[in-house]
Image (cartoon, rainbow, N blue to C red):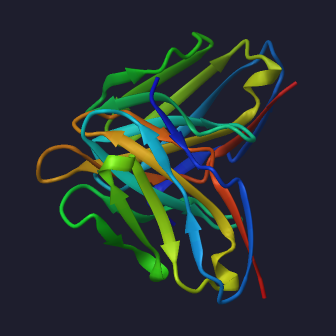
Amino acid sequence: ETGVTQTPRHLVMGMTNKKSLKCEQHLGHNAMYWYKQSAKKPLELMFVYNFKEQTENNSVPSRFSPECPNSSHLFLHLHTLQPEDSALYLCASSGRTSGQNPDTQYFGPGTRLTVL
Amino acid sequence: AQSVSQHNHHVILSEAASLELGCNYSYGGTVNLFWYVQYPGQHLQLLLKYFSGDPLVKGIKGFEAEFIKSKFSFNLRKPSVQWSDTAEYFCAVNNRGTYKYIFGTGTRLKVLA
């Protein structure tokens, strides 16, 4: 257990569905991240939130919509996805070093998403 | 564009063999460097990290890595691998002062008993 939980662990959805992924961290961290992990590709950083404010949006299509209501919770809202969006979606969180820079990321187990 | 290259995608070793996994990055600024490991069925977890100071860093389970700034490299080493080291290893780079992280494609290590 890393202190970062994700639900659901598996999700199958059609292209016209709307669903949400949830991430919660119990580590007191200030930053939370969404990554996409596809086979044979590097982890792709999608979004970053620092104290609820979005600091990175890595040119992610608008069919992915993040929400960060507080520093402990992060959501990824999905709508009208494509089959190529099928992947493992990882959430991570990080605290800060004494120099106020981002520190080590702690990862959740991921949500395995399949889009039919 | 920034990138992280891990040259070995699959490595198979016998127990007690020495391991070195390559990692090179492209970025001219100041970076923090990480190696993460993902054991079968488990989360990604930190193996070791370099922020500053001694360029030879030691991590968990006998792993170490050396930051060579002139070569933009951060190679991972272990003198004698064990069967339990079978996992996927990821190198990552963070542009210091930002929340931007770039990961390599990973190296799958299989250690034969």
Furthest residue in direction front, as rendered: B70
| Residue B34 appears in the figure | yes
Q: Quadrant of residue B112?
A: bottom right
Compared to B88, does B23 lie above or below? above
Answer left or right for B40 relative to A70: right
- Identify the residue at horizontal 38%, vertical 46% (top origin): B72
The percent position of residue A57, horizontal first and vertical second, equals 43, 19
Q: Quadrant of residue B65?
A: bottom left
Answer left or right for B18 relative to A86: left
Compared to B11, does A98 lie above or below? above
Task: Tell me how many marks there are.
Answer: 0
Compared to B111, does A40 lie above or below? above
- Identify the residue at horizontal 55%, vertical 17% (top origin): A60
Instruction: Name the foreground residue: A74 vs B89.
Output: B89
Compared to A1, does A108 lie above or below? above
The percent position of residue B3, horizontal first and vertical second, equals 49, 34
Q: Quadrant of the C terminus of chain B?
A: bottom right
Instruction: Name the foreground residue: A116 vs B88.
Output: B88
Furthest residue in direction right, as rendered: A116
